[in-house]
Image (spheres, rainbow, N blue to C red):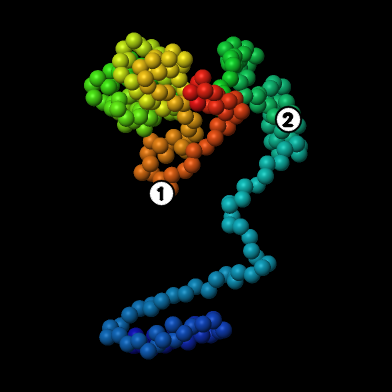
Amino acid sequence: MATLRITRAVNLLHRQFSGFNLGPIQRMSHLHTTRAIGTVFRIDRPAQFVSLNNLRDNKGSRKTKKRVGRGHGSGHGKTCGRGQKGQKSRSGNSKPGPGFEGGQTPLMRVFPKRGFKNAHARDLQPLNLDKIQHWINTGRLDASKPITLKSIYDANLVKFKDGVSLLGRGSGYLQVPITIEVTRASKEAIKRVEELGGRVVCVYHNKLALRALLKPEKFAILPKSAMPMTAKMRRMYEDKERRG
């Protein structure tokens, strides 16, 4: 009985959907079952098939454009929903510019900025001679070896971003000769180090070279040292008085 119903349903589909691929449905006519079943399946025929002349967006997917100034009966005529007078009723962009405070003096004019931020400035961390002597006395620095920026970084002497500037505060505390490489050095610091038989060398490092010096394990091939970018910096690092 069930097999007969399936066969009749397949034949009905053949008549209604002639020309469609009904291979899977045809194979259902060979199914057998041991119990009687009611409606095996139901396929509703579409109201119309999709074609080029009935392609359109779903209903409600596109909002109708608001048409203003088309008569009083539309609800958006004459003043077009803007009301009578005022800032928001004017033509053009009714919103004020950034910083406008309703006629009150804006904050940018009450507290104006002064000066500028130099994008090419280098943030050099000051390092004084008395601190170097203290690190040597406590065994955190080895005075018998050249003190480089890598030594300063490893000993946590100072934390720096672009380099270190050697200054002469506490020059009387320095008692041992040292060989030190820094970014810049003051005349007082150079004089005291050389009085004790030491040596000061000012070395230029760009950001890449400084990172390679401090963390060489991050590089498979160490980059070459770059020249100073500006003519003023080149003259400074070539000046013997500044120990470039």
User: How crowded is the residue under tag 1: few (<14 C-alpha within 10 Å), some, or many (20+)?
Assistant: few
Instruction: Identify the residue under disc 2.
Output: 92
**Is the Cβ of the residue at disc 2 closer than 8 Å to that at disc 1?**
no
- Residue 119 image position (x, y, % from top left): 56, 27
Q: Quadrant of the N terminus?
A: bottom left
Tell me the mark number nearer the camera, choosing from 2 and 1. Answer: 1
Q: Distance from label 2 to label 1 (Cα)?
A: 60 Å
Instruction: Identify the residue under disc 1.
Output: 220
Per the image, label 2 sits on a secondary structure element best described as: loop
Q: Residue at x 64, y 70 (%)?
A: 51
Q: Residue at x 65, y 65 (%)?
A: 54
- Residue type at tag 1: Ala
Above or below, 154 against 186 in this view is below
Per the image, label 1 sits on a secondary structure element best described as: loop
The foreground one among 70 and 147 is 147
The foreground one among 8 and 226 is 226
Q: Is residue 74 left or right of residue 105?
A: right
Quarter-wise, where is residue 33 in the image?
bottom left
The foreground one among 146 and 83 is 146
Above or below, 46 against 209 in this view is below
- Residue type at tag 2: Gly
